[in-house]
Structures are given as C-alpha cells and as structure tokens.
Image (tube, grey):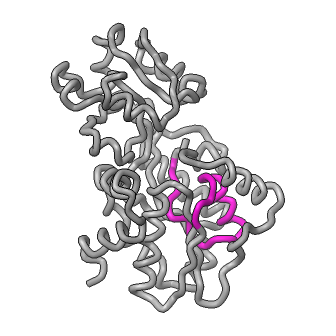
Amino acid sequence: MRIKKTGMALMLAGIVLLTSGCALPGLGGAAGDTVKIGTQSISESQIMGEIIRQLIEHETDIHVDMVNNLGSSIVQHKALVNKDIDIASVLYTGTSLTGPLGMKAVKDPDEALKTVQKGYKERFNLKWFNSYGFSNTYAFAMRKGEAKKRGIKTVSDLEKYKDGLKLGVDTSWLQRKGDGYKGFVKHYGFDFDNKYPMQIGLVYQALKNHKMDVVLAYSTDGRIPAYNLALLKDDKRFFPPYDGSPVARNEVLKKHPELAPLLERLAGKIDTNTMQQLNYEADGKKREPSRIAKEFLVKNNYFK
C-alpha cells in the first residue's frame, strides 16, 4: 500500500537493487562512525529520516549519510537486509507483515506490532522499534460540514446513504484482494451504487470541489487538515493497521549503543494528526523536510 508518489525511474532503480544485489550509487555499507539512513521518496519518510538524522547529530559524534528516494517499502527493506543502509526512517506493520514476512494481515495494532518485531528479529536480525504513534492506513474521508450535516462519524454510518453518495477511490483498491473493495462489501455488508475509480492523488481535490461525497484517503495525508476533511472511524476494523516505526540493523545498534535510546525517544510522540500537519508543511507549503524536522525537534524539546 505504501507505494505512492513513486516515479518510474525510482521503481526501476529499486528493481535493479532487488534483482542484482548491487548497490545503488551512494549506497554501500557504513564505514567507521558513519550510519546511513534510508528514506522513500514520500515526504513522510523523508521528514522522519531528517528527524532521526538531526537527533543523532545533536546527541552523538556519529556522522550520518542520507540515502533518499528509495522507491518503496520493499526497496527500503532490501537495502537494510543488504546492509546498504543502517536505519530505515519508517516502515509500516501492515506492509511488512504481508510483504517481507509473507504472513496474513493482523487487524489488532498491538498484535501486528509484536508480530513484526519478533519476525524481523528472527528472520532478518533487524530491530523494529515501537511505533512513532501514527498509522498511515486507508481511511474514508468526507468534507467536515457534510459529515456533520448527515451525522456521519463512522464507516457504518455510510450505509444509510449508500445509494446517493458518490464514492471516489484509488483504481487499484477496487481490484485489490483482502483489504480491497470486494472485501469491504463483505465485511461491512453494504455496497455503494456510485463508485468512481481515479488516481489516489486526485481524490482529495475531487472531494474538496464537491465532485465526490466520500473518498478513500491515506490517513496521514496533509490535505486532510488543509481541505478541512473528516476521517470516518473504521468501527468494524476492516483495514489492517499500518503503524509506522524506525527499523535498524542490530549489528549497527551493537556497534553504536547510543543509537537505540535515541530512536526509542521518538516512540509514541507523533500521532496521526501531527503527521498530517508535518506532511502538509512539505506537500502543501512546499517546505524542506529538514526545516520541518528541526522545527518539530525544537518545539518538542528534543534539543534541550
């Protein structure tokens, strides 16, 4: 699910990395007192990478190299396993459960976290830290005024209006197995009459401009607060959790024991609303992830 805003060139680069086992330009194992932080091309991943970099550089003498624009969570994971990077800025429980671990989705967030932590330690010798506190999952969104007017707070509340509301969704979600539309209908027990497949990046504007009444969004997208949208509660827990955490190589944590406590300081400190705002600073206001990260660290007293 976490493959969004990814250019074809980045995907091709990722395929080369996966299939050849060769390092991308700029990659390669860390040397001496240098650690490498890998990020995806999305703002969320790059902001979290900058937060980690600045925290490490402020608190230690370790030099940090950034390896940005890794094409997807899968490419980021392979870079960790191949020792091309030492820390992944953020990986997601739902993606890693069904991807690298090859397991079924787990609906309970705590159980999902424990499963990936155990699996990544045993199978990949990687440390999966506790979640930052946000979940970048699928979520139905409406304009706040419209939701309030109709008294809609949960996904179940949509059933009453299913014949009249226009639903805009990512094209791939309609065909997706497991947590796609077919599964949704079975799980919630109702179907929308008016479904409109479109690119995921267009659903927010379509909702804002009243072209759609309900859309399937990503829960940490910065356009949710910017467009004054409301996320509906997934009251029957259909979508698996995609809680975000940093992941690091145990070999590097053993060599630099000061790193783990620094990463643990971020656990539970960034909830979904906060991540929406941070993403909006990058995607809506076009600000640099490094400046957004510094402001977050200063505001939350990490530099004292």
Split into 4 quadrants, where in the image is the C terminus?
A: bottom left
Question: Residue 112, how many percent across, how many down?
Answer: 49, 47
Q: Camera-side residue: 114 or 227?
A: 227
Q: Residue at x 61, y 43 (%)?
A: 98
**Residue 272 left/right relative to 126:** left
Q: Residue at x 64, y 90 (%)?
A: 32
- Outermost residue on the right side: it is 20
Q: Residue at x 54, y 19 (%)?
A: 182
Q: Residue at x 55, y 38 (%)?
A: 105
Where, by quadrant of the figure, is residue 83 drawn?
A: bottom right
Question: Residue 3, how many percent across, how many down?
Answer: 57, 45
Q: Is residue 208 magenta?
A: no
**Callout count:** 0
Q: Is residue 79 magenta?
A: yes
Split into 4 quadrants, where in the image is the N terminus?
A: top right
Question: Residue 277, how many percent across, how many down?
Answer: 30, 54
The answer to whether residue 279 is above or below residue 207 is below
- Outermost residue on the left side: it is 149
The answer to whether residue 151 is above or below residue 24 is above
Question: Which residues lie in the magenta part?
Answer: 68-93
Question: Residue 139, how many percent across, how many down?
Answer: 39, 35
**Residue 84 left/right relative to 193:** right
The answer to whether residue 139 is above or below residue 162 is below
**Residue 199 left/right relative to 210:** right
Where, by quadrant of the figure, is residue 38 drawn?
A: bottom right
**Residue 52 left/right relative to 91:** left
